[in-house]
Amino acid sequence: MSAFSLETFQKISQLKPGIKDPNRINIFVNHKFLCSLSFKVFSEKNLKVGDVLTEERIAELVALSSLDKLYQSTLEYCLSRPHSEKEIRDYLHRKQLRRRQSQIKYDNFKKRLAEDEEYRAKIQEMRKNVRAQNEKIREIDFTENNTYEYTGRKSLNLPTKPGAEITETQINLVVERLKQEKFLSDYNFTRFYIDNRNQSKGISRKKLLYELKSKGISESLVREVLESDELFSQREDDTEIDNMIEKKLRRPITREKLMAYLVRQGFSYDLIKSKLSAIESENLQSKS
């Protein structure tokens, strides 16, 4: 920001697609890179080359760029599979924590560079050597020598300046936008989760409620979903335990191990005992 305040006026001098991400537009002010915006946000702001920007407008664009990038990365995570709102908030808070840790690491690095002359000279020498290595790599004909072809440019892996701090306001804005654009829905997530558990190995209602509660889903919402669909509404522990016992008995297993497994799935001891006793009784009758 301080680099721009030295100019008598601040004007958008160039707009071009990003190199790493061509789906973003890089904005240059007075021939210096300012920030980037996704096509969607860029089109909403109606920016064009020659626009004169105030300090307040520049600050707004930088903040918008940070929020936009956070939304895009969260959207990619959100689309990997259905998520609950709590899962998305947990994801954003993890990013927030990593960003703060990176800032502390970077600040300590810069402080040591400023205070430790020997360390500063060492880093300068390392940077010089890496630049020289990268110059040699650029000159290599990989059709004859592919030593570095798959490793790319060399780097020092030193701390770099992280992005702006992720605030609670930004987290709330990202979550609300995902919900508004129908990418995030606790109801849809709950349906997905129950259906997925049905198709895998089954689960008792007690454990299902416990697992979904840990993901921020209320018991009332779980019951609403279970009652909203005929397939889900027929999901009773009595049927679920029969299916699970049948699957487990396809391979040799002791009564004790089977009981322990069913208990871990959340079924009551009385129900387990009743079902196993009935199976044992049928086995005795078939042998007699």
Image (spheres, rainbow, N blue to C red):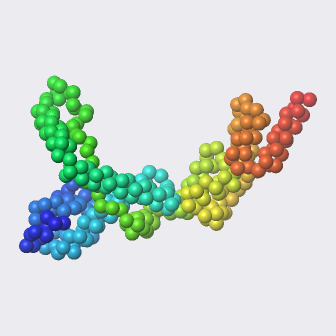
State the image coordinates of residue 39 (x, y, percent, origin top left). Answer: 26, 62
Residue, x 39% and y 69% (percent of image)? 169
Instruction: Name which residue lies at 20% across and 70% down.
Output: 58
Q: Is residue 134 visible?
A: no
Q: Position of residue 88 (x, y in %)?
A: 46, 59
Q: Which residue is drawn at the image coordinates 18% and 42% (left, top)?
A: 118
Looking at the image, residue 249 sits to the left or right of residue 118; the answer is: right
Q: Residue furthest left?
A: 8
Asked whether, in this view, residue 281 is left or right of residue 30, the answer is right
Q: Quadrant of residue 229?
A: bottom right
**Between 236 and 148, the one nearer to me in the picture:** 148
Q: Is residue 125 visible?
A: yes
Quadrant in the rendering for residue 124: top left
Quarter of the image with the C terminus in it: top right
**Residue 163 in the image: x percent, y percent?**
29, 58
20, above or below 71, in the image: above
Q: Where 37 falls versus 207 (above or below)?
A: below
Nearest the eye: 121 or 54: 121
Q: Residue at x 66, y 52 (%)?
A: 207
Position above or below: 247 against 271:
above
The answer to whether residue 237 is above or below residue 186 is above
Q: Please give the count of numbered marks on the rendered protein.
A: 0
Residue lying farthest to the right in this orientation: 288
Looking at the image, the residue that sits furthest to the top is: 144
Quadrant where the N terminus lies? bottom left
Q: Nearer the viewer, residue 163 or 267?
A: 163
Residue 119, position as x, y percentages in the image: 20, 43
Q: Nearer the viewer, residue 31 or 105?
A: 105
